[in-house]
């Protein structure tokens, strides 16, 4: 595998898989540029060396062909803001004659962005011929898209076959993602705490089972907490509930007990009379949520208790919000956890934010610079922490 940091890219053309799958508003403006910012240092190193970069990415989930709302041309203003003095060209296809002409003509110090890879169904199928065509855009293949590393797609995995060991590698972002995840998985300082939130138990089963083996504490919040509370006999009103997972919730609680891992569930909640930003709300005991009411955030007692555990920890993973933080009225619990994480990190703890909604929450709280590492890949980080082999990593490392 190519040693990215110590490679001089002067005169080299790099075809680079980036993760520019960023949110756009109704005017097609980028509303969160975390992933673009994450790839910037890798791109800058190649340009500073005197190389050029052909960037390829997906955006959204187009169905069977080009759709304007998923065109990567919309991200060019944001990309230009990160590289104000760099010429950025755009190819309105990724494997057309025009795209190949533009990559062939690319000068040192310049950038070319290819159109959305998923406008071709061959991308998600991992098609070999499609991957070979993409490989023609550069002399060296760099994968810096950790957010797609769990996908066996043409640009994330198959493409690596067309480059020998000395001409493929990871960029700074991918290397940092793997390094920080491994720091958490192998030999981290105790006490270790995982904060697991989000909507569904079903999305986090494998993560919870893996974490029980290594964590001293597991804090459970968000919608998934109500299935556990119901399993323990609590009355949860109309809160989110997965009846098929009650038995599994019991097994997870039993396994944690056997492993001396303490699981913490919310003691109190902010309940709402409906799922809406302007819903009526009140503080309730988590085990006695009235009929017709649903829990949408953790309450102040729970936020304080969770904060104590977090601030007493030396290694912390956060994956998933504590409530519906998109609604201002139900964001306090999630932001309280973010604040506790920042304070723990200030005091020397290692904190890893596991991508997805947690990354959005830490950014929204303005505390992203006070945690150790914010992952750009929600699903990929989840699978890596579950112990799965990621195709995008294996394709490079062998």
Image: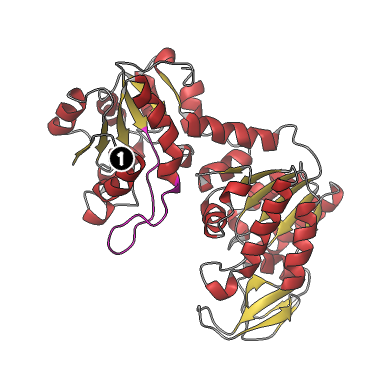
Residue 231 visible, this orientation: no
Q: In this view, does 79 lie above or below 328?
A: above
For residue 146, side relative to residue 185 (left or right): left
What residue appears at the point 70 percent right and 46 percent down from the top-left corner?
345
Residue 162: percent from the left, percent from the top? Answer: 34, 19
Taking depth in this image into account, of 86 and 207 the one nearest to the observer is 86
Q: Mark 1 points at which residue?
A: 84
Magenta stretch, main secondary structure, is: loop
In front: 368, or 180?
368
Place of residue 149 in the rendered image (x, y in percent of width and height, measured from the top left) = 47, 36
Is residue 228 left or right of 29 when viewed as pictured?
right
Looking at the rendered structure, the number of numbered marks drawn on it comes to 1
State the colouring used for the structure image. secondary structure
Residue 383 image-quadrant placement: top right
Q: Which quadrant of the structure image shows residue 358? A: bottom right
Identify the magenta region: 17-34
| 100 lies above or below 378 | above
Q: Residues within 10 Å of mark 1 (few under 14, many from 20)?
A: few
Closer to us: 47 or 166: 47
């Amino acid at each position: 595998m190519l040693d990215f940091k110590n490679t001089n890219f002067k005169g080299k053309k790099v075809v680079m898989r980036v993760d520019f799958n960023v949110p756009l508003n109704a005017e097609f403006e980028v509303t969160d540029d975390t992933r673009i910012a994450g790839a910037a240092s890798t791109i800058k190193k190649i340009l500073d060396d005197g190389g050029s970069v052909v960037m390829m990415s997906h955006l959204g989930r187009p169905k069977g062909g080009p759709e304007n709302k998923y065109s990567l041309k919309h991200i060019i203003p944001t990309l230009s803001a990160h590289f104000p003095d760099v010429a950025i060209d755009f190819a309105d296809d990724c494997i057309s004659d025009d795209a190949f002409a533009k990559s062939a003509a690319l000068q040192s110090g310049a950038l070319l962005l290819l159109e959305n890879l998923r406008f071709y169904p061959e991308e998600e199928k991992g098609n070999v011929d499609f991957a070979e065509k993409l490989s023609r855009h550069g002399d060296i293949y760099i994968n810096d898209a950790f957010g797609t590393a769990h996908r066996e797609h043409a640009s994330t995995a198959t493409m690596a076959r067309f480059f020998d060991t000395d001409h493929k590698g990871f960029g700074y972002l991918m290397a940092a993602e793997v390094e920080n995840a491994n720091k958490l998985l192998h030999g981290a300082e105790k006490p270790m705490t995982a904060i697991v939130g989000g909507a569904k138990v079903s999305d986090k089963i494998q993560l919870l089972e893996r974490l029980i083996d290594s964590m001293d504490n597991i804090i459970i919040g968000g919608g998934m907490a109500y299935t556990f509370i119901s399993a323990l006999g609590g009355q949860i009103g109309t809160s989110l509930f997965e009846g098929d997972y009650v038995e599994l919730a019991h097994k997870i609680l039993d396994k944690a007990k056997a492993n001396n891992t303490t699981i913490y569930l919310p003691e109190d909640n902010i309940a709402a009379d409906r799922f809406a930003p302007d819903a009526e709300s009140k503080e309730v005991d988590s085990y006695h949520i009235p009929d017709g009411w649903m829990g949408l955030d953790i309450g102040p007692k729970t936020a304080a208790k969770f904060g104590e555990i977090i601030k007493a920890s030396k290694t912390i993973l956060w994956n998933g919000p504590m409530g519906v933080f998109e609604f201002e009225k139900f964001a306090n619990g999630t932001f309280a956890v973010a604040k506790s994480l920042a304070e723990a990190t200030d005091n020397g703890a290692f904190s890893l934010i596991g991508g997805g909604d947690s990354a959005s929450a830490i950014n929204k709280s303005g505390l992203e610079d006070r945690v150790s590492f914010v992952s750009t890949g929600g699903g990929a980080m989840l699978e890596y922490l579950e112990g799965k082999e990621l195709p995008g990593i294996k394709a490079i490392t062998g």
